[in-house]
Amino acid sequence: MDPELLLRTLAAALRLSTPLILCAMAGLLSERSGIVDIGLEGKMLAAAFAAASMAAVTGSAWLALLCGIVIATLMALLHGYACITQRGNQVVSGVAINLLASGLTVVLGSYWFQQGGQTPMLTDLGRFRPLELPGVTLLNGVPILGAIYRDLVSGYSLIVYVALIAVPATHWLVNKTRFGLRLRAVGEYPQAVDTAGVSVTWLRYRAVLLCGLLTGIAGTYVSIAQNAGFSRDMTAGQGFIALAAMIFGKWRPYPALGACLLFGLLDAVSIRLQGVRIAGIGEVPVQLIQALPYALTVLLLAGFIGKAVAPKASGIPYVKER
Amino acid sequence: MPDDTANTAGPPAIELRHIDKRFGEVHANRDVSLSVRRGSITGIIGENGAGKSTLMSILYGFYEADSGEILVGGEARHIRTPSDAIAAGIGMVHQHFMLVENFTVLENIMLGVEGGAILKHGAAAARREVERLEREYGLGVDPDARVAELPVGAQQRVEILKALYRGAKIMVLDEPTGVLTPQETDQLFRVLASLRARGETIILITHKLREIMAVTDEVYVMRAGSMVAQRRTVETSEQELAELMVGRKIRLSLDKAPAAAGPPVLTVSHLTVHDERGVQRLDDVSFTLAAGEILGIAGVSGNGQSELLEVLAGIRAPEKGSFTLDGREITAAQPCGPSEMRDLGVAHVPEDRHRLGLVSNFTASESALLGYQHDPAFAGGWLLDRGKIQRYCAALMEKFDVRPRAPNLRSANFSGGNQQKLIIARELTRGPKVLLVGQPTRGVDIGAIEFIHRQLLRHREAGAAILVVSVELEEVMALADRILVMCGGRITGELAAREADERRLGLMMANAAPLPANAVPPDETQGEAWGEPWRGEP
Amino acid sequence: MSGARPDLPRWADIGLIPLVNVLLAFIVAGLVVVVIGESPLEAVQVMLSGALGSGEGLGYTLYYATNFIFTGLAVAIAFHAGLFNIGGEGQAYIGGLGVGLLLLGLDHSLSWPILLPLAVVAALLFGAAWAFIPAWLQAYRGSHIVITTIMFNFLASSLMVYLLVNVLNEHGATSPESRNIAATAQLPFISDILGGFGIKMAHTPLNLSILIAVLACVFVWIYVWHTPWGYELRTVGQSERAAVYAGVKPRRVILVTLCISGALAGLVGVNEIMGVQHRLLLNFNAGYGFTGIAVALMGRNHPLGVVLAAILFGILTQGGAELSFEMPNIDRNMVTVIQGLVILFSGALAHLSRPWLEALFALLSRRRPSLKEA
């Protein structure tokens, strides 16, 4: 295979994985604390819309990022309120948030921008453009490493690097800090945390807020870095794929990263495969390639994971039983 | 019992004045007052539902009292959360351990007092402190062991370490011996004596009269939410305490017709079972059960009794070995499900009444159908005859005095005793050949206990073969004609009921060799580090 | 321990709280309308008149309600077994595929009275088949039904696109769809039936499949509450351990229940393909699956409640269409927003209003002791 093509496919894979990575980390933090979150998709979508709208209006990518984070966090708080304080059904809450996001983004978008749900196309002004890391031109001459550095290491927009940093950061937070110890405890046996004098509620809210933060970044990336504006339902189920990746990774950051990269790679490869004839099979149908991530998710959920062991208290509202 | 240790003068360690607490309609604590002397071991005794746990939950900050005061060391304290209690020097060892199973011992102890935002910073100091406490109090546990892999006695020591680590001067233990063998219980009481020797004040909540008599200095009796009596332990007796607990003269033994066992009905042969994690639960168990006899299975929870019931009821398949019932042999190759067992004439009153015996959200009628939903008497053709089911339930309630007589009331709204009576009614009216009963009177008030025991005896006289599993040795000794003891999945002893006493049974429960009736058990003190040796029964 | 809440009389628990929840949903929706600069009351008026104010509106409302009944029953029956079937979208889609294939094959040989029961069977089978794999994975592998059914929704979409673009499409058509089925194979419209009796009614998509919907309700009611299998279903949903104790095989019950659930959702195909569209096309399942969740939650998983909730959502959908003509500022997706709010308030925030209502009842009962239930 052409090395140029290989590099560019891998780079595309990383770009496509970015929202998955961020959402997987978000979901991980929430679920390790015991709150199931099906609403990653909705939060990401809402943040995408908020960011794109802010970018269209102000032309500032940074304000857009802030706006995306705020909106996602508000929705996360809503989910948290329903699940933690009201002790409601967590899956139902997630579904509600997805629908709310899907509907509100179009309703508000149509009203504000009069483009049937889309936000105005953005120029470079409101977007996170790819960054060129220092030394690219310098290393360009170097045979293999130069190409790798130019195509694979450099040239991503900021948020991609943020996503990559988010993984070790999450790992460190969960495993090496006091907050992480308490977080893990609250997801396994919240009574132990309660009797130790630590607030179960506050811990879970913090987890949920972090989840909002990360999905906000993910959504912002989707609308103003990966694309040039918002269109309806643009997240196309990536929130659910991130959820699946988190489950494969058995709720651990690095394995989840691996799963996200795998799915991103699949996605990148599928784009390249469109229209290509494979010997003996003929032309691969577009729809099959598009369906691959979903089919693979089901296969992996069925085969390799079976009964993946979620945090023990996951999905169960905490009640002081006596 | 002697308490001539330490300085017991000064203000009481804990004083509760006029504590009152309601939960909706339930008046859990009615104007309760008590005073605990420093450096003493004080017991609080009462039946299930008497209000002891609620009182201690208030002391530990789980709940706030509606009115009343708490004084620690003579000073009034507002205890609104467990943090406040910990700050006041109160530590609690809960009945269900508050341990995260996936964590190590050290992580569990550090949880909440990590000593810094980064774990590493506090861990070294924590480890040193834990090792110091272990040496001083003799509570040997490996700090890096995963709690899930520790035996129950060790887990309890971790709970005690947790409290000591936080500087508890007053330790409350809530029903600590429910999961321990008598020998582990001895060990625990030695630890308590050692703690007392070092100036700790201990409050022991229990419903077990023997423990109170054995180890406490003073005892408070609670009944139906009120504090009804206070005694110095030396000045009272089990009988008096039992009467105070219940409020009337009770007999601790039943009138039982002599055993008249018939032919064997159930033969169990070399039954072996492992659980999902590969841990062995039943190890080569064999016995027979005859018609017209009650066979009691004694033993601490978790030694295979539950699995034995599950296998005999058809809920779990045997791995090796078999059992034979009415000519049908059940083996791993030819398993039998619960419905087939019912067809063979087996009825099952499960240990866990709330999760297995009935469905909380179903009405009583619907719970009365559980297990028998395909019975042609209720399901003519494809449809259930709801009217018929309701009348059936009403008849059951009448016969077994289940109150209130409301077949349409939600099952969860009945009291524990009435729920149990309903379940027993459901199973007994089938006229089973074999009745399997697990923990028949757990969480049941004393009036219902007597009723249930009488029902079991009546069916024994009618020729049913009854297997009773119970952690309450008194119950087993009162009901059974023969007693088997299980420990570690094996049957470690068999006694006729009249030969059984607590000490012999206790040794079998710990799988020590059975002793002749007059022998003195081996001395199990552990040297000078224990301070004053605990003196057992005279 | 947690569970019995005797502070509210039973009628309030069953009837009032759900009503209050729905009301809260609508109030919030109203706020959104205000933000868009329109009047909620005016919007409600337009919606109601659009949905109920004419025979035509009513017909459309009931046509939508038919689909909502199917998907609502699907979600409801799964809930009784403690499972959340989010796959209604995909199951409805594939159910329609089944109906379409049957009709495309037989429409020239048989006419609708014979084809109708066959189409029902096809819809049931195909819908159940689409639920089967996620059901089996949940029952026997413990794979979370929520994730797998969501994935299957996407898979259904891809499959249908592939089939309609490559296999079934009518050559020369501008959008991917199959040929029309013969007129004799089409289900009669209610307006035509009534016309036959001399009652004049404007033409609407409402067709005979609404009777199927009613039959489905009766079936679910009998099955869940009046058969031993329904009893076992509910036992599994309440307490799997009690079910095992009672001799039930929970895995089998889960599998069967989810397949029935998928089958019910598949019936949307009868309405859409045989009754209205008369051909296979893309996206005829358009959100019916998700609305089913709202309908089931609002209707508290009981067939009667499902019917009422389905009609309400029918009103919303038809009224929503009218609304987008009369008040163009309010996008049609407002109905999605309302769905989300109903799910939120009926499902996740279901007990939000409880403390207020308990206080209210306590207040009232202090004044009139007769109000307090025993």
Image (tube, rainbow, N blue to C red):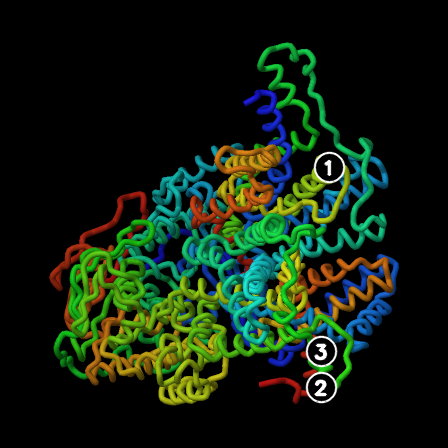
Badge 3: how crowded within 10 Å, few (<14), some, or many (20+)?
some
Instruction: Specify whether B257 is left or right of B133.
Output: left
Please tell me whether mark 3 or mark 1 is closer to you in this view.
3
Amino acid marked by disc 2 = Phe
Residue named by callout 2: C197
Q: Nearer the viewer, residue B137 or C371?
A: C371
Amino acid marked by disc 1 = Asn
Q: CA distance from mark 2 to mark 3?
A: 9 Å
Q: Nearer the viewer, residue B3 or B429?
A: B429
The chain letter for the residue carrying disc 1 is: A
Q: Nearer the viewer, residue B232 or C318?
A: C318
User: Could you tell me which secondary element the residue under label 1 belongs to?
Assistant: loop
Disc number for residue A227: 1
Q: Earlier in the sequence, mark 2 or mark 3?
A: 3
**Quadrant of residue C359 in the image?**
bottom right
Residue named by callout 3: C192
| Both marks 3 and 1 on one chain | no
For residue B497, above or below residue B152: below
- Pointers 2 and 3 in contact (C-beta within 8 Å): no
**Quadrant of residue A100 in the image?**
bottom right
Q: Position of residue C51 (x, y in %)?
A: 78, 72
